């Protein structure tokens, strides 16, 4: 054994350590899976016993336990039940909140994924990449394809594997926030038109959530969650709170505040929506002007780098040629 340890160089020792770490993680995952399987089996046995007892007296069968039901659409809003076999309690522990922080959970909600499944997928992706990338870096370095200090390379690969899923979620969430800003003017106009044909506010929101999913893919989904929460007994203000604050859009928050005020106090809604739509269009015009101004500044730099040399050659070239010929004639 001492002879074997003496033959190990730092690269092989690091690879062996990572292999042992991976084996320990696999063993821990197996123990957790075994525990979750036992918990799920106990719930199924208990559920069958309860259904048999209630069926004997003619009572309806109870709803399935929280760990046995597949999450419904309301799970995207955090109101549904966790899926079958999902170790949701691990996400509420100290280590779960450390590995999947509140910022990560907010990004998952902004991406439109179901909270529990999204958090578990994020945790699994982080664990897999945090082990796979350092092992790949060690293998590449052993093959001579990657240089540098092995400790620094391994640490950098670990950090990259741990942070890469969050970066991907951030890009997806940023794209959805941009789509919310693009869909908001159309949302206001459709709501105003539906109010103009005589529909109530509840009917208009229901039609927007069910019949305009192709036109408003992001806002229609968020509105469907809000309508589902409202149908379950929540006030309109609470059901629209997630839609108002999730994507960080101030105009959407103002629109939600307007809808809540109209739902609470009543009154005409077409004129406020018309004014809000006009203000939103003015804001978009100002944003487009600012974007055009920034593009003009960037194009100035590009023109200086690309067009100025050609312009100097075209305009000053004949002068330089004439001077060269004059100096050549004087030398003769």
Image (cartoon, rainbow, N blue to C red):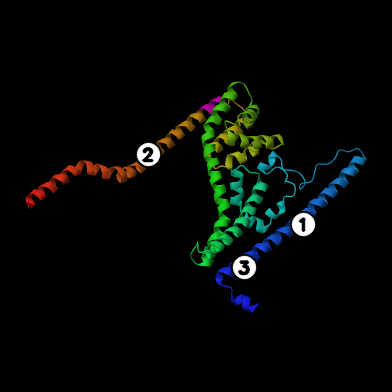
Q: Nearer the viewer, residue 297 or 138?
A: 138
Name the residue that disc number 3 marks. Answer: 16
Task: Compare marks 3 and 2 and give the one earlier in the sequence.
Answer: 3
Is residue 309 rendered to the left or right of residue 44? left
Which of the 4 quarters of the picture holds residue 206? top right
Name the residue that disc number 1 marks. Answer: 35
- Region in magenta: 269-274
Q: Nearer the viewer, mark 1 or mark 2?
A: 1
Mark seen at residue 293: 2
At x 58%, y 69%, the residue is: 12
Which of the 4 quarters of the picture holds residue 71? top right
How far apart marks 1 and 2 lie (CA) works out to: 60 Å
Q: Position of residue 327 (x, y in %)?
A: 10, 50
Q: Position of residue 177 (x, y in %)?
A: 54, 41
Q: Secondary structure at mark 3?
A: helix
Q: Secondary structure at mark 1?
A: helix
Q: Nearer the viewer, mark 3 or mark 1?
A: 3
207 shown above or below 140: above
Is residue 34 rendered to the left or right of residue 255? right
């Amino acid at each position: 054994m001492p002879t074997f340890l003496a033959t190990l160089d730092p690269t092989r020792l690091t690879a062996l350590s990572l292999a042992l770490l991976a084996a320990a993680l696999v063993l821990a995952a197996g123990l957790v899976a075994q525990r979750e399987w036992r918990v799920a089996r106990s719930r199924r046995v208990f559920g069958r016993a309860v259904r048999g007892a209630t069926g004997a007296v003619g009572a309806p069968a109870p709803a399935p336990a929280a760990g046995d039901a597949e999450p419904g659409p309301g799970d995207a809003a955090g109101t549904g039940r966790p899926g079958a076999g999902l170790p949701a309690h691990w996400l509420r522990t100290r280590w779960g909140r450390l590995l999947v922080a509140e910022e990560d959970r907010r990004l998952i909600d902004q991406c439109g994924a179901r909270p529990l499944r999204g958090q578990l997928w994020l945790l699994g992706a982080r664990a897999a990449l945090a082990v796979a990338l350092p092992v790949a870096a060690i293998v590449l370095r052993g093959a001579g394809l990657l240089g540098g200090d092995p400790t620094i390379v391994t640490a950098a690969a670990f950090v990259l594997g741990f942070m890469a899923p969050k970066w991907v979620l951030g890009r997806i969430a940023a794209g959805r926030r941009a789509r919310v800003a693009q869909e908001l003017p159309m949302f206001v106009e459709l709501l105003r038109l539906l109010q103009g044909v005589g529909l109530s506010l509840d009917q208009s929101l229901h039609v927007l959530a069910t019949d305009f999913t192709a036109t408003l893919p992001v806002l229609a989904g968020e509105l469907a969650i809000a309508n589902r929460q409202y149908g379950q007994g929540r006030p309109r203000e609470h059901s629209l709170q997630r839609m108002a604050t999730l994507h960080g859009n101030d105009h959407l928050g103002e629109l939600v505040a307007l809808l809540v005020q109209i739902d609470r106090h009543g009154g005409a809604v077409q004129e406020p929506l018309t004014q809000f739509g006009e203000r939103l269009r003015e804001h978009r015009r100002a944003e487009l002007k600012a974007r055009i101004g920034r593009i003009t500044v960037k194009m100035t730099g590009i023109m200086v780098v690309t067009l100025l040399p050609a312009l100097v050659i075209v305009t000053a070239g004949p002068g330089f040629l004439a001077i060269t010929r004059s100096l050549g004639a004087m030398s003769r």
